[in-house]
Amino acid sequence: MIDAIFVALQMVLAVIGVYQFTFSLFGLYRKKKKEHFPTTKSFAVLVAAHNEEQVVGALMENLKKLDYPKELYDVFVICDNCTDSTADIVREHGMNACERTNPTLRGKGYAIEWMLKELWSMPREYDAIVMFDADNLAAPNFLSEMNDDLSGGARVIQGYIDTKNPEDSWITAAYGISYWYINRLWQLSRHNLNMANFLGGTGMCFETKLLKEMGWGATSLVEDLEFTMRSVKNGVYPKFNYDAKVFDEKPLTFKASSRQRLRWMQGHFTVARRYFFPLLWQSIKERSLVKFDLALYGVNVYIVLLTFLMTATMWVDMAFFGGPNIVNIYGYLPFWLSFIAIVANISTFFVAMALEKVTYKKVYQYLILFPIYLLSWYPITFYAFFTQNNKQWSHTEHTRVVRMEEVVQSKQV
């Protein structure tokens, strides 16, 4: 009985692996012809910030230089429970500092929900809302790209999340590799197939009318994934804009990275519990591959957990019980097939870096440590499963001040 369950689960995981790999192949190419529209859309640019005095000034400078009519966008920084000079720095740059104090409802999701209510009560009505984090930098064409997509009928848009400090440490390099892979072989592949993309927490754009219709309502630890699920459940499919880049600062240390990823996985479990079965049922009723694909993405946290538990079980069996005593379907496959499967999965990261024309020398040097980053997701996810009811928001401290000129220069070296 146990062997039958084990084999069935292995087969399910294998099918999911083939499914995801097949989808990634559609990210190998990029459609270059795009329709451009006159710059007519107005934007409220929201920046969620909690004690970000070290980095918020660089973002304010960056947003002033966007290649978009200045009268068509305003910047609002949500100074959420700040105890430093974040608000003062924002005002020094001539931007709107919106101070919020609520020690109970803490976190980005609650801050955004509060800010949207404030925004709806203001006399000016914007066509769309764009969201950044305080440690970000936006490419000069970001709003122009959002204008094109909105004018073309998109209602929710995710920009390309790049890394502004990939050479700072082996951890930031690992984040960079992961995001190049995600942008190219997850996001772009689904964009090419006209499927739903998932939101990434920053570099997001929302049609104002849609937000007023749906409400924000995304206050979990992963508000981006939560809103993605709500959108698709309501038949609104987020789009991906490859050319609208936002550069995000990544944690410098393994400890800080683990804390951040633990928060992501805790929130991911919450969202999976809430939305997986409703989306799966909708996908079956409507015969919708789009909704099935997103349901599968939502439950991915359980797939990672299951993979870890099954692998750990086999290791324990061999180490302490003279195994293998558990049936392993991979042991019955031809060696060459298993070898090809492993090489194909590993090569996707190298392919993504080649397609994205990554030139950072240190990132290639740090590649030898990348497997440690990948494997660390397993214990983090395992711990997150048992602490998923912890809704306490944890702040990732940002201290690395990088300006757009430095990002451009480092990519050219």
Image (spheres, helix red, strand yellow):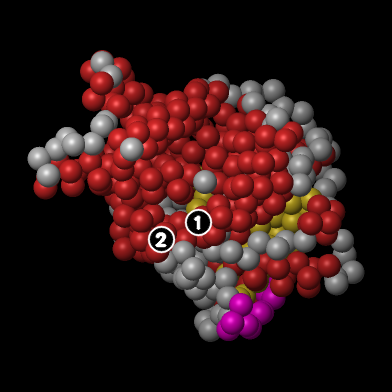
Q: State the image coordinates of residue 399 (x, y, percent, origin top left).
A: 42, 67
The residue singled out by tag 2 in the image is 384
Instruction: Name which residue type carries label 2.
Output: Ala
Task: Find numbered disc 1 in the image and state the secondary structure of the residue it sits on.
Answer: helix
Instruction: Name which residue type carries label 1.
Output: Phe
Q: From the viewer's side, name the closer residue of 292 and 113.
A: 292
- Other residues around mark 1 within 10 Å, as few (<14) / some (14–19) / many (≥20): many
Q: State the image coordinates of residue 240 (x, y, percent, origin top left).
A: 64, 38
Residues at circles 2 and 1 in contact by the CB criterion of under 8 Å: yes
Residue in the picture at 63% in, 66% down? 219
The residue singled out by tag 1 in the image is 269
Can residue 310 be seen here? yes
Residue in the picture at 51% in, 55% down? 268
Q: State the image coordinates of residue 25 (x, y, percent, origin top left).
A: 50, 23
Task: Find numbered disc 2 in the image and state the secondary structure of the residue it sits on.
Answer: helix
Relative to 359, does residue 58 appear above or below in the rendering?
A: below
Q: Is residue 362 left or right of residue 97?
A: left
Main SS class of the magenta portion in the image: loop
Residue 52 belongs to the span the image colors magenta: no
